[in-house]
Image: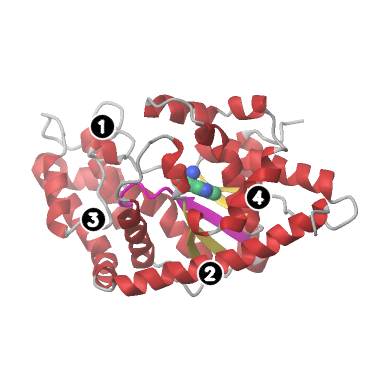
Amino acid sequence: MPNENSYEVALKKSDAIRADLDVNPQNYTMLTGDRPTGRLHLGHYFGTLKGRVELQNKGCHTNVLIADYQVITDRDTTDQIQDNVYNMVMDYLACGIDPDKTMIYAHSAVPAANQLMLPFLSLVSEAELLRNPTVKAEQEASGHELTGLLLTYPVHQACDILFCKGNVVPVGRDQLPHIELTRTIARRFNNRFCKNCDPVFPEVDALLSDVPLLSGLDGRKMSKSYGNAINISMTAEETAKRIKKSQTDSERMITFDPENRPGVSGLLSTAAICTGRSEIEIAEEIGMGGSGQLKKYVTEAVNNYFEPIRERRHRFENDLDYVKDVLAEGNRRANEIAKATLAEVAEAMGMVY
Ligand code: TRP
């Protein structure tokens, strides 16, 4: 029998959920989030934001978390955090997340959700925490020591998902170990403490993305630290400049060849996703036009696609009070939900005095 936690099984389950989401959206509660370490970029937009908006508009319960506590898993400063958080709300709103339909909240503003960490920590072993491959990779990439928070943040992530009884979590493959741990924690809690009551927590599944990851302008993983990303919040001019500076190669003829021509291919993929055309079609059209023409094409494609989004964003940039209100209201609702869940947890554990 295939392992319940294998990628293939997760993918099958995810496809089944995707089909059922169209029929029974009200049965699903989605929770996902981002670390507020900087501005969101095109990789975030096409990889997850667009999908969140689609789920929101299908009518399932949607929750978006600004994971401010996760910022300090592997760095020792919270400089810029307030600015990053407000800008993240602006990115969300500009991209179509509707605060009347989707709850937007920040980790640190919901004490009752964080308190779930205590019983949850008792349900996992040291060995389980230490063998999480994603945590290991993040620790190595950061060059930082393994803090207690980095080691246990997957448990904290289980609190994020379970406080609102989330049952679908849109994630990339790298986050699958965390979903497995969340499922384990929910089951162990229900088995251990809900012998005389209904289970408190639902079964959680990953919703795996069906769009390939958009690479950066140089063909490497899109990342702020590589300078190969275009942020949603950039102006048309900043976008043009970033594309102009991106590295191509000396061959004039434009072809799509991600392995041997990462720069040219990264540009083609960016244009393809913004226009809905294929990379090969665009490459053939530009042909001997060379990288100058390719860059012009990419710039127009990105700027046209993001023009309405950036226009909306400007309105929010000029109305910080509104942005703060959206977050305050999301935090208020999240606290209500978290308190109700924590009360169920206390009841199941007999901690009612
Ligand atoms: N770990 C996610 C990231 O790095 C953010 C996140 C925090 C999250 N809590 C979550 C994602 C719960 C899904 C579910 O972007």
Give the residues drawn in magenta, as a range: 28-40
Q: Is residue 195 left or right of residue 322?
A: right
Label 2 near label 3: C-beta < 8 Å? no
Q: Counting residues from the N terminus, which is met first, the one under dot 4 or under dot 3?
A: 4
Comparing 326 with 347, the one in front is 347
Report, in whole angstroms, how far the alpha carbon at label 1 lies from the one at label 3.
19 Å
Q: Is residue 144 magenta?
A: no
Label 2 near label 1: C-beta < 8 Å? no
Q: Which residue is tagged 2? A: 332
Label 4: which secondary element: loop
Label 3 near label 4: C-beta < 8 Å? no
Name the mark on residue 116: 4
Q: Which residue is tagged 3? A: 302
Report, in whole angstroms, how far the alpha carbon at label 3 lies from the one at label 2.
36 Å
Instruction: Tell me the mark number nearer the camera, choosing from 4 and 3.
Output: 4
- Residue 345 on image: x %, y %: 75, 55
Query: Disc 3 marks which amino acid?
Result: Val
Instruction: Decide if residue 18 is in sight here.
Output: no
Q: Counting residues from the N terminus, which is met first, the one under dot 1 or under dot 3?
A: 1
Q: Residue at x 65, y 27 (%)?
A: 126
Give the answer, above or below, for where 162 lies relative to 306.
above
Give the answer, above or below, for where 218 lies relative to 31.
above
Q: Is residue 80 left or right of residue 52?
A: left
Q: Which residue is tagged 1? A: 262
Query: Disc 4 marks which amino acid?
Result: Leu
Label 3 near label 1: C-beta < 8 Å? no
Comparing 32 with 329, the one in front is 329
